[in-house]
Amino acid sequence: MRVRRGLARGLIRLAGWKSVGTVPPSGIMVGAPHTSNWDWVATVLLLWSHDVSPRVLIKQDLFKGPLAIILRATGGIPIDRSNAVTVVSDLAARAAEDESFVIVLAAEGTRSHGEHWKSGFHRLARQTGLPVSFGYIDGPSKTVGMGPTLEMTDDIQADMDKIRAIYADKRGIRPEYRIEPRLREEDRPS
């Protein structure tokens, strides 16, 4: 673990980036803005630099050939995004079995520009009682870090207002692909 931690810290510094914040030992970590394939590398390095072994949700299409070996070795979990309900219930079961469970997901669900975040992190947090920590990558400041940890509530609007405040000044590696934190559920009349 110490070798991995030292390697991760060294690689972050070597790349000219800085790491800030504290990574909790368990829970859900939302990584945003998700604007580049390098986000995955930066997130894994951030967590390794804090001795945390992440489980990273990655679309199952990428688990082919040699890349599948690398993804699994670094905590990748193949996800069938066409069946979100099953994904959340499967993750809730895994979280209940492992007290050092840190699941990492990109709430935007894609690196290309979209309109909404995926709501799975919010549903998973409410179903499991796990807190949600908000990791980020900010290209302009060359920072990868952890923001605050929040408990998700039944008040989606209030939760998302707090999350928007966290990410207000975070741009990602490719700012043109940044998606404003907003769930589709916020646009539906109550």
Image: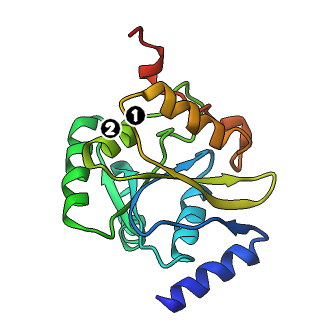
Tell me where residue 115 sits by quadrant. Answer: top right
Asked if the residues shown at circle 2 and circle 1 are in contact, with their CB atoms under 8 angstroms apart, the answer is yes
Element type at marker 2? helix
Q: Is residue 11 left or right of residue 53?
A: right
Q: Is residue 15 left or right of residue 84?
A: right
Q: Which mark is residue 123?
A: 2
Tell me where residue 165 sits by quadrant. Answer: top right
Badge 1 density bin: few <14, some 14–19, many ≥20, Cα 10 Å: some
Q: Is residue 88 visible?
A: yes
Residue 44, x across and y down, in percent: 52, 67
Q: Residue at x 20, y 59 (%)?
A: 96
Q: Is residue 173 left or right of residue 3?
A: right
Vertical side of 47 occupied by 8: above or below: below
Vertical side of 158 occupied by 3: above or below: below
In this view, the residue farthest toward the bottom is: 3
Q: Is residue 112 visible?
A: no
Residue 63, x across and y down, in percent: 35, 58
Picture quarter with the C terminus = top left
Element type at marker 1? loop
> What distance separates the C-alpha of mark 2 from that of mark 1?
6 Å
Name the residue carrying label 1.
Answer: 119
Q: Residue at x 29, y 44 (%)?
A: 80
Pick the residue in front: 20 or 90.
Answer: 20
Vertical side of 32 occupied by 98: above or below: below
Q: Residue at x 58, y 69 (%)?
A: 46
Q: How is the image coloured?
A: rainbow
Q: Residue at x 62, y 53 (%)?
A: 136
Q: Amino acid at mark 2?
A: Arg
Badge 2 density bin: few <14, some 14–19, many ≥20, Cα 10 Å: some
Residue 7, x across and y down, in percent: 60, 85
Q: Amino acid at mark 1?
A: Ser
Q: Which mark is residue 86?
A: none
